[in-house]
Image (cartoon, rainbow, N blue to C red):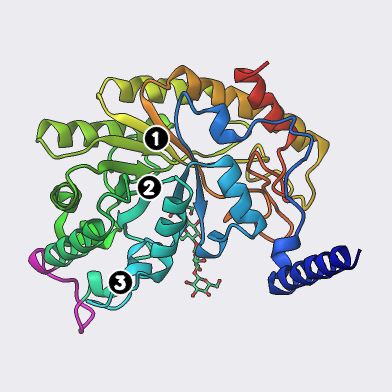
Amino acid sequence: MKNYTCHFSMLVAIMLLIISCSSPEDITPDPVNDDREYIPLKELFKDHFPIGAAVTPNHMDSRTPHGRTLIEHFNSLVAENVMKPDALQRVKGTYTWTNADRIVQFAKENDMKVRGHTLTWHSQTPDWFFYDENGDLHTPEVAMKQLEEHITTVVSRYKGDVYAWDVVNEAMFDWDPNGQIIYREDSPWYKIMGPAYIDSAFVYARRADPDAKLFYNDYNSIFSWKRNKIYDLVKRLKDNNIPIDGVGLQGHWNVGVSEQDIRTTLDLFRDLGVEIQITELDLSVYLSSDEPGSEVYTDAFNLRQKIAYPMIMKILLDYSDIITGVTFWGIGDDVTWLDRPGRRHFPFLLDEQLKPKPAYLEVQKLIRR
Ligand code: G3I
């Protein structure tokens, strides 16, 4: 009896020690349903394409709800911000790797792929890439050399860890129904050297990691005025033997997105012989920017997503021979770049508590009935 009491006291002591060493997040209840009526996203689509999420470094902890949800549902990660030029090389010649490394490390520990976003962009890129100390634009030679140095350093560091890069982001002019303006001419890259930076960026990335998949990535790419420009760009690059492997369709859509627009775009790019990835999927609950904003997820929003999400995922399954990845631009409805006070967008399949929404179960029916 004495022995049992002794063992019991020791057990209690060990348990108290474990509890006292835990952070409060360790004892947060599992964020997902216990009834297991759902199949994790990565399992659901495992025969078709990896399912990714855009993340921030503070998600990279398996003791947090976000970390646990990533491990449960996703097998691919992309940094929402911390691999952009302003995060990696804010000051010329001084690289800051800590945040990006955390994401790569977490992915490795949890057997996930990593997409790299982004090497060449007009936004979130420090001025020194473009302007000299007098505020004048660099010569093409100087700007090109700096771009080469940045791409070579970043891609080499993550060689073998990052399997696909958004080499150039959003270089095409967005709204131009007559198709007169092809490139985004307000980009400092374009102002310095015209579209030549696009070609060079792909060449530098390929040299640094011959095995990485190289993507051109853009938004509004399912609309005729833009997809044709992207088609022409990719065709020109391929015709000139510039190494490009794929096109990233960002997928910042809303519940009114047209099935025909998506299918027509996928058919068009299929002809180019490139891979397609949906790189930044989020599906706003509003049908237009004129619709009044809401802070709550209404029955109407729920119904719209229960129809639109399976429609989209069915298309992606239909084209899974050319679609090599689908990445959401976030994890759950609690955090999204879209939200403004008074106007929340609820764009994901997981809700604010990171639990599957009714739309998720509708998507699941596409595969498992
Ligand atoms: O860097 C500052 C930080 O120092 C400060 O503490 C913080 C406080 O608000 O702001 C930080 O910068 C913000 C940054 O996100 C990091 O949180 C910027 O103000 C904010 O503008 C920036 O927004 C990002 C946006 O790209 C910038 O263009 C969004 O999070 C990110 O989701 C969004 O992602 C883009 C893709 O890269 C390309 N495609 C479109 C997509 C959505 O816009």
Q: Is residue 89 magenta?
A: no
Compared with 265, 12 (above or below) is below
Q: Give how far across and how far down residue 268 sits, in percent.
A: 33, 22
Q: CA distance from mark 1 to mark 2?
A: 11 Å
Residue 136: within the magenta?
yes
CA distance for labels 3 and 1: 27 Å
Query: Badge 3 is on which residue?
Result: 89
Amino acid type of the residue that numbered disc 1 sits on in the rendered structure: Gln
Q: Is residue 92 left or right of residue 4?
A: left
Residue 115: which numbered mark, if any?
A: 2
Along the polypeptide, which appears first: circle 1 or circle 2?
Answer: 2
Secondary structure at numbered mark 1: strand
User: Residue at 31% of width from left, 21% of height from top?
Assistant: 270
Residue 277 is marked as 1
Q: Main secondary structure of the magenta part?
A: loop
Q: Report crowding for label 1: few under 14, some 14 to 19, many 20 or more residues within 10 A (C-alpha).
A: many
Do the residues under discs 1 and 2 have CB atoms within 8 angstroms?
yes
**Secondary structure state at the residue bearing disc 3:** loop
For the question of whether residue 335 can be seen, the reply is no
